[in-house]
Image (cartoon, helix red, strand yellow):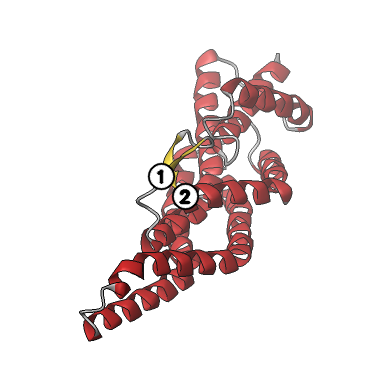
């Protein structure tokens, strides 16, 4: 009986993480698959974690709610930092002039900008290729050693980490997009000066958008490898934040 109670608490935390963490949280991934992954991981984790000693159904339900909150905070932290590259791509797309065109993104099942969609796809491949999803799952498994199932005394306290995490993600998004945005702005400023110096030469106005898009895409192409590596380092920071979540709730 204690094993089943512990399993219910373990699957609550792991399931919440799987449902909200990057790659798995996309609408294109069936919820049944996410549930199956959470159940399989719980079967592996439950035998090696301390058993929960709960006597009543109300205690069990309350503990499961706490585990879900902890899992949401952990998975949401990774998702917030993962969104930095999407934010950076949106900034670059608006500066380059590609935000007026949108494509259907099967990952999010929505209309997104060209650069945003491509960057999200590449970031997802890097995330999987670097086995970062396994590192996140391993960090969540280690959290059971710090906070055994049902032992979270104040699950809501971990939510305070989302404020600095969101601030850090926005800062990183601006920092990732900064170089391309500044260089594209300089090109736009040059074209604007040329139009002012030679108002009768409409050629600068006619080809300005083409030059802006061409230069912007060239800069994006050159910055993409560094952009993905920087983004990978940003997402890796979430592993240490997951440990802080466990420390706050115990």
Q: Which quarter of the figure is the C terminus placed in?
A: top right
Q: Is there any visible trace of residue 95 in the rendered image?
A: yes
Which mark is drawn over residue 114? 2
Q: Position of residue 5 (x, y in %)?
A: 65, 19
Q: Which residue is mark 1?
A: 102
Q: Position of residue 92 (x, y in %)?
A: 43, 61
Left or right, 15 with reference to 1? left
Of residues 199 and 168, the one drawn nearer to the viewer in this rendering: 199
Of residues 109 and 132, the one drawn nearer to the viewer in this rendering: 109
Q: Residue at x 56, y 43 (%)?
A: 74
Left or right, 122 with reference to 203? right
C-alpha separation, residue under disc 2 versus residue under disc 1: 6 Å
Q: Is there any visible trace of residue 51 in the rendered image?
A: no
Q: Is the C-beta separation of discs 2 and 1 under 8 Å?
A: yes
Left or right, 16 with reference to 95? right
Q: Residue at x 77, y 28 (%)?
A: 44
Q: Residue at x 37, y 64 (%)?
A: 95
Of residues 199 and 127, the one drawn nearer to the viewer in this rendering: 199
Q: Which quarter of the figure is the N terminus placed in?
A: top right
Above or below: residue 64 compared with residue 234: above
Task: Name the quadrant containing residue 150.
Answer: top right
Above or below: residue 102 compared with residue 235: above
Residue located farthest toward the bottom when viewing the structure as drawn: 197
């Amino acid at each position: 009986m204690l094993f089943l109670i512990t399993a219910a608490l373990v699957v609550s935390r792991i399931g919440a993480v799987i449902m909200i963490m990057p790659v798995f949280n996309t609408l294109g991934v069936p919820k049944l698959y996410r549930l199956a992954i959470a159940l399989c991981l719980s079967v592996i984790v439950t035998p090696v974690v301390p058993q929960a000693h709960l006597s009543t159904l109300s205690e069990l339900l309350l503990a499961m709610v706490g585990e879900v909150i902890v899992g949401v905070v952990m998975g949401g932290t990774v998702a917030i930092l993962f969104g930095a590259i999407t934010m950076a791509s949106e900034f670059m797309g608006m500066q380059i002039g590609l935000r007026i065109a949108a494509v259907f993104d099967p990952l999010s099942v929505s209309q997104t900008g060209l650069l945003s969609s491509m960057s999200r796809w590449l970031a997802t491949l890097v995330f999987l290729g670097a086995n970062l999803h396994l590192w996140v799952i391993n960090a969540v498994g280690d959290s059971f050693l710090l906070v055994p199932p049902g032992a979270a005394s104040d699950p809501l306290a971990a939510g305070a980490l989302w404020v600095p995490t969101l601030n850090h993600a926005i800062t990183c998004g601006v920092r990732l997009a900064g170089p391309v945005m500044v260089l594209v702005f300089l090109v736009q400023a040059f074209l604007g000066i040329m139009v002012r110096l030679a108002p009768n030469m409409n050629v600068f106005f006619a080809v300005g958008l083409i030059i802006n898009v061409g230069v912007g895409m060239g800069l994006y192409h050159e910055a993409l490898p560094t952009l993905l590596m920087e983004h990978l380092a940003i997402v890796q920071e979430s592993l240490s934040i997951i440990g802080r979540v466990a420390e706050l709730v115990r």
